[in-house]
Amino acid sequence: MKVFEKLLEIQKKNNSLLCIGLDPQLEKLPEGIQRNTFGILEFNKLIIENTKKFVCAYKLNFAFYEQFGSEGFDLLEKTVELIPNEIVKIADGKRGDIGSTSQAYAKSIFQHFGFDCATLNPLMGVDSLTPFFEFDDKLNFVLACTSNPGASDFQKLRIDNRFFYELIIEKFTDNFTKEQLGFVVGATNELEFQSIREKVVDNFLLVPGIGTQGGNLARILEINRNRNIIINVSRDIIFASKEKNFIEKVIEKTLYYRNQLQVV
Ligand code: OMP
C-alpha cells in the first residue's frame, strides 16, 4: 500500500490529523526518567504507548538523535521499532544533495530505518531530490514556507513576480504526483498557507509551528477546509509536564489537540 493511502486510512481509523513530534531533549525530561539515551527510549516508549490511538503519525527530527552519536542512532532505530506499522513514521532530516548523495540518504531513511516519509530541502533543485521519489510508494514533504522568521530571507522573496516558495511548489508539482509529494508549510505563515492551499489542492501539507511556536490552529483549519493535512506538535505535547506523572499530562494535551483535529 502506498504511504498516501496508509495515511488516509490511519487518519480515518484514529479519527486524527495529529502528528506528535518525538524530539527529545535531556534537560526537559521529567522526574523519574534517566537523563541519558536509555531514559529517552523509556520516555519515547511511554509517549507512543499512550498516544498511538490518537495520532496519525510520529515525526522524529534526526537532530535530537544524532546529537548522541552512535547511541543516538541506536535510539532512533529502537524508537522506530516501537511505532505500530499502521501509523505513519516521518523522518525529519530536511535532506537534499547531489543525486548520488541523496540516493544514500534515501536508502538510509527508507531502507535502513524503515520510515514512510522524509522531509526534504529543495534548495539544490529537483534533481537533488529525485532519488527520494524513486521510492515511489513513499510520501516526501518538500519545505515550501517554513515556520521560522528566516523564512523571509529567501522563501518569501519575489522572483519574476512570484514568491520563491511558489516557484518551489510549481517545480515539484510539475514533476511528482500528489501521492508522492507533500509540502511543509509552517502554521506561523497564515497568508502563505492560504495561497499555497489554494494552489495545492490535493497534496498533503505537513504543518509544524503549533504550540510552542505560536501558530493559530483554528485559523489554519479554517483556511484548510478539510483538505489533506497533518498537524505536527512536538514540545507542547511531549514536555507537557516535568512531574513524575507526566504521562497523564501528555495524554491530556494530546486529547486537547486531537479533539480539534478530528477527521470530518
Ligand atoms: P515544536 O515547535 O516543538 O512543535 O517542534 C516543531 C518541529 O517541526 C521541530 O522538529 C522542527 O524542526 C520542525 N519544523 C518546524 O518547526 N518548522 C518548519 O518549518 C519545518 C519543520 C519540519 O520540517 O518539521
Image (tube, grey):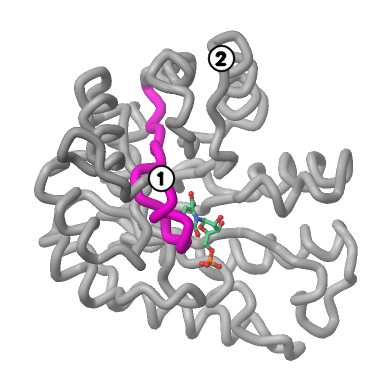
Relative to residue 225, is residue 169 depicted above or below?
Answer: above
Disc 2 is placed on an element classified as: loop
Q: Going by the image, does 110 lie left or right of 129?
A: right
Q: Amino acid at mark 1?
A: Phe
Q: Amino acid at mark 2?
A: Ile
Residue for badge 1: 154
Q: Nearer the viewer, mark 2 or mark 1?
A: 1
Residue that sits furthest to the top in the current view: 100
Q: Within the magenta stretch, is there residue 114?
A: no
Residue numbers of the magenta segment: 137-153
Residue 163: image quadrant is: top left
Residue for badge 2: 98
Using the image as rendered, state which of residue 143 and residue 262 is in the foreground: 143
> Whole-percent x and y of residue 225?
11, 61
Q: Going by the image, does 34 lie left or right of 107?
A: right
Q: Quadrant of the C terminus?
A: bottom left
Res. 53 visible in picture:
no
| Residue at point 61%, 50% (across, down) | 61
| Residue at point 43%, 31% (across, down) | 122
Q: Within the magenta stretch, is there residue 138?
A: yes
Distance between the alpha carbons at the discs numbered 2 and 1: 21 Å
Residue 141: image quadrant is: top left
Relative to residue 178, is residue 8 depicted above or below?
Answer: below
| Residue at point 37%, 47% (across, down) | 184
| Residue at point 52%, 79% (across, down) | 251
